Image: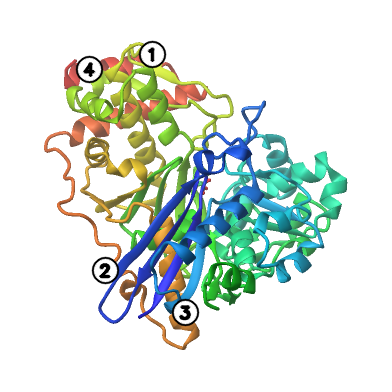
Amino acid sequence: MAIYVGFDVSTQSLTAIAIDVSGTRREVVFERSLGYDADFPAYGTTHGVLPREDPLVATSSPLMWAEALDRMMGILGRESGLDLAQVRAVSGSGQQHGSVYLNAHARTVLAGLDAARPLVEQLGGVFTRKASPIWMDSSTARQCEEITRALGGAEAVSRLTGSVAFERFTGPQIRKFHEYDPASYKRTAMIHLVSSYGASLLAGRHAPIDPGDGAGMSLMDLARRQWSPAALAATAPDLLGKLPPLAESWSVVGSLAEYWRRRHGLPAAKVVAWSGDNPCSLVGVGLAGEGEVAISLGTSDTLFGTMREARTDPTLAASVFGAPTGDYMALLCFKNGSLARERVRDAARLDWPGFSRALRDTRPGNRGALMLPWFEAEITPNVLEPGVRRYGGLEPESGPANVRAVVEGQMMALATHSRWMGVEVREIRATGGAAANAEILQVMADVHGAPVRRLKVGNSACLGAALRAYHADELSEGRRVPWKEIVSGFVEPEDPPVQPTAGLGAMYAELTRVYAACEAHALGKGPEPVPLIAAFRTRFGT
Ligand code: XUL
């Protein structure tokens, strides 16, 4: 019997999944989530974000993440019913880009954690910055410009690091920190990502960053998988000495620190390097090759797929990260995911069944009524001034039409911005909370003209982390198990797939063109789309 545990420190919750891979048995034997807002109310978060005045700023609490990890370990140790002695390795996934700032004292504290006292009581003095900027932050536009200029322009940054310097990426955030609080920056001995911070807590020592998450910092040379001296110099002084080393995603960082063994009864299992949530999801959805893409409908909506080589997006919207398999992955991130669907649902005074009903009762194509759902500043495309844009006569009061407009808009944005990958989408694997909604998946299948398969395990990032622990454990014992075999039995899609509705292909192809024109207009890059919408209505009926 061999048990592997994956953790996921995500935006709104911390999840743990344990898998059992004994012989032919392949089973998820434990799954549990703790929501920050409800389970850790003392931190005062809303959807996992600390109170804020500036809507462009988004931070969370690294102490809260540690407390959540400690509580989850307690649950694993006392309530899970697992045979803990069989836990061979653990790994994790972290919301990407978020950063944790530690002083020189942290090294000693991590190495000497006292099992008699809760983790949070011991970590109080290790942070040089109490609030961690997270991926929802868009407050670093100026820093992005400065870094971009220093590195020779947006195309150059994209070629070097895999993405342009996005506001949420860690490098621009570090530059801002250095600018606003140089004294605290100076006292910072180590800057971790959420992922490497999680691994460090588990191993009781500073853990490395993997190329999956490292690529989301605007600091890593993507092709070489090394810190880029030019990018470091363009960001902040003395940065190299404050970063953990980069190490392959399957590196064994150490074993579970004594704290976890004594306090919660866990064994000396291997701690495998953590990675970002999207790289972990790539494994957790079992993506085998080019042509298969996954869409994750979570707090953010993301679309991602594997690439053998490090191609970058000529339109500069997408990011390319190292994949934890050693390949590369392309990713598109839309900040207005579940939060936008919730806002529309609330405005229409519906519950989720009512939201689904509205999708069933409205007509595909929405009679040319379109929404650019930018409730929050958007990442794809880059929109710093939030505000929903409506076209084709859609009004905020239009009720069910807004429901169809938000979902169709999201799906068309995914289709438009992933075109550069040149991948003919044969199948979509759907994951994340909103993938439970069959009506949303139907719109996904219709807009993309491809079958959609929902995966049995909703939290693909967390499952991916557990599978990575399994893979790394085997590798460290000298067994190179192919990825197909690692994921088999865990990532089987639920049957039957959601098939695209016959006869809608031409309509959605046209509507997606209209949507792209609306987007260009809203960004001040294109003419009024009114004639296009009129032509669409003439051709496809009103
Ligand atoms: C990806 C991104 C988000 C976060 C949180 O670039 O910003 O998907 O990883 O899920």
Q: Indicate whether 121 appears above or below 377.
A: below
Indicate yes or no: mark 4 CB to ligand 1 under 8 Å: no
Q: Which disc number belongs to residue 489?
A: 2
CA distance separating discs 1 and 2: 45 Å
Q: Which disc number belongs to residue 338?
A: none
For label 3, the crowd category at 10 Å Cα-Cα, with few meaning under 14, some 14 to 19 and many 20 or more, is many
The quarter of the displayed image where residue 53 is located: top right
- Tag 1 residue: 396
- Helix, strand or loop for disc 1: loop
Q: Indicate whether 342 appears above or below 196.
A: above
For label 1, the crowd category at 10 Å Cα-Cα, with few meaning under 14, some 14 to 19 and many 20 or more, is some
- Helix, strand or loop for disc 2: loop
The quarter of the displayed image where residue 181 is located: top right
CA distance separating discs 1 and 4: 21 Å
Instruction: Name the quarter where the C terminus is drawn.
Output: top left
Q: Indicate whether 326 appears above or below 505.
A: below
- Tag 3 residue: 473
Q: Earlier in the sequence, mark 1 or mark 3?
A: 1
Q: Which disc number belongs to residue 537?
A: 4
